[in-house]
Amino acid sequence: MKALVIDDGKIHREMIGLVLEALEVEVRLVESAEEGLAALAEETFDLISLDLHLPDMDGLEFCRQLRNDEETRLLPIVLLTSEDAGATLKMAYGAGVTEVMRKTSIEELQKAFTFLVNRLRRTCSGRVLYVEDSPTTAQLTISILNEMGLDVDHYSTGEAALKAFVQQDYDAVVTDVVLEGEMSGLNVVRGIRSAAADKREIPVLAVSGHEDLSRRVEILRSGANDYIEKPIVDDEFKARLGNLIINKQLFDQVRSQQDELRKLAVTDQLTGLYNRTYLAETAQKYVSSAIRHRESLSLLMVDLDKFKNINDTHGHAAGDKVLAAIGAMLSSRCREEDVVARFGGEEFIILLPRCDLENAIYKAEHLCRFIRELQPDDLEISASFGVSSIYQGERHIDFEKLLKEADTALYAAKRNGRDRVEVFNEDCMEASA
């Protein structure tokens, strides 16, 4: 295995080189994007370690160039950075980076690179569901699958195979077309393609001793991804199945990165709560659903008292610790179906589906007490709460109006001494006028 390390810092570049060489990886060290591109034109590499900041090109732009080249489109690229911002992660995944590693201790980098190199060396890994009713053929094929580094669950009937498919996760299915029992290989493929959405896309390689063209077409129409004839040629079988598994795992990786990007887009990086963008996109749906199904829904607006004094007296780092601690506490004290979001600065919004006013007040008072007792970073903190509510969908109201009502109640809580809960009512409206 060969790796290209691109980093303009001599000490860090050589440190990464030593880590990789200890893993028996041949390493070439360069210090600029230009030298990296020249090295790629001369040699083939299995892995690139890339610094985020290069002297002649941004590391992300370098990555984009590689992803636009057919030769390096799928080359694993590790981005090394000392930055911890969510925006950096988002841009890195968007540029096509395979993994992001922090420039922390050498021990952490050793662990991360060891895991990655071992994964890359195992060119094909995973679990295969294999359906074959001939013991002799099954024994030979299982031997090939094990040589590829694959774990195998073997069944001789389609009925048993589909039962296992529902209970276990697989990276591929290999099935003979003709099987003992009432279910053929075609039925197995159709059963897989009609399974739940998270399982139906698994790659299927069909195997048959028949050379009839119409049979091959029917197998593919049934949902098989590929087809191979008996007797199996080892290298062809390995290549076809290996391609299916690798493509599936690459797709899973891309989907995982997309999920991470979506999560970053709707998450406040400091507190881990939902952000204002997510709230704007989803809150009205909760309100509309409550009205449509005649369910109660409540909204809590939370504002930390005199938070500016913390930043001014103890610094913004201390303020960030307070916000992070408050976010963690609010998240842990709310139900899974509740929406807890940082609205901005030191303000938080909590949407409580299927929660009437009485229970919302009870919830707010408990959270108010928990904040008072929290004392993050040994600082005394309190918060004011404003509560608004829809009772069994009886009011036709939109989220903005519900939010404004909670804000009015919050203003009353501030006016009445802070560190307390106020509920929206006519008195609040008159006081705020």
Image (cartoon, grey):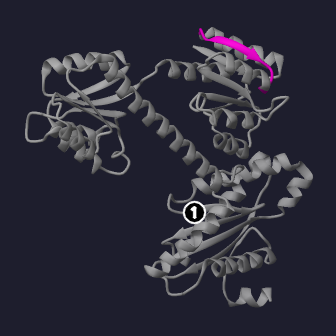
Q: Is residue 54 left or right of residue 407?
A: right
In the rendered structure, does residue 26 fall within the stretch colored magenta? Answer: yes
In the rendered structure, does residue 317 fall within the stretch colored magenta? Answer: no
Above or below for 355 versus 152: below
What residue is rendered at 24% in x and 42% in y? 217
What residue is rendered at 60% in x and 81% in y? 398
What residue is rendered at 58% in x and 84% in y? 397
Under mark 1, the amino acid is: Val
Res. 308 visible in picture:
yes
Q: Is residue 280 left or right of residue 151?
A: right
Residue placed farthest to the front in the image?
213
Above or below for 49 versus 338: above
Q: Quick one: label 1, few (<14), some, or many (20+) residues within 10 Å?
A: many
Name the spot of residue 20 as percent of width and height, x first. 65, 14
Name the spot of residue 276 as percent of width and height, x first. 68, 63
- The residue range painted magenta reads 24-33
What residue is rendered at 63% in x and 56% in y? 266
Q: Nearer the viewer, residue 246 or 285?
A: 246
Which residue is the site of mark 1? 339
Residue placed farthest to the left in the image?
181
Q: Nearer the viewer, residue 249 or 268?
A: 249
Res. 350 visible in picture:
no
What is the quadrant of the N terminus in the image? top right
What is the quadrant of the C terminus in the image? bottom right
Which element type, helix, strand or loop, lies under badge 1? strand
Residue placed farthest to the right in the image?
312
Name the spot of residue 171 as percent of width and height, x first. 37, 33
Q: Quadrant of residue 299?
A: bottom right
Q: Nearer the viewer, residue 374 or 271?
A: 271
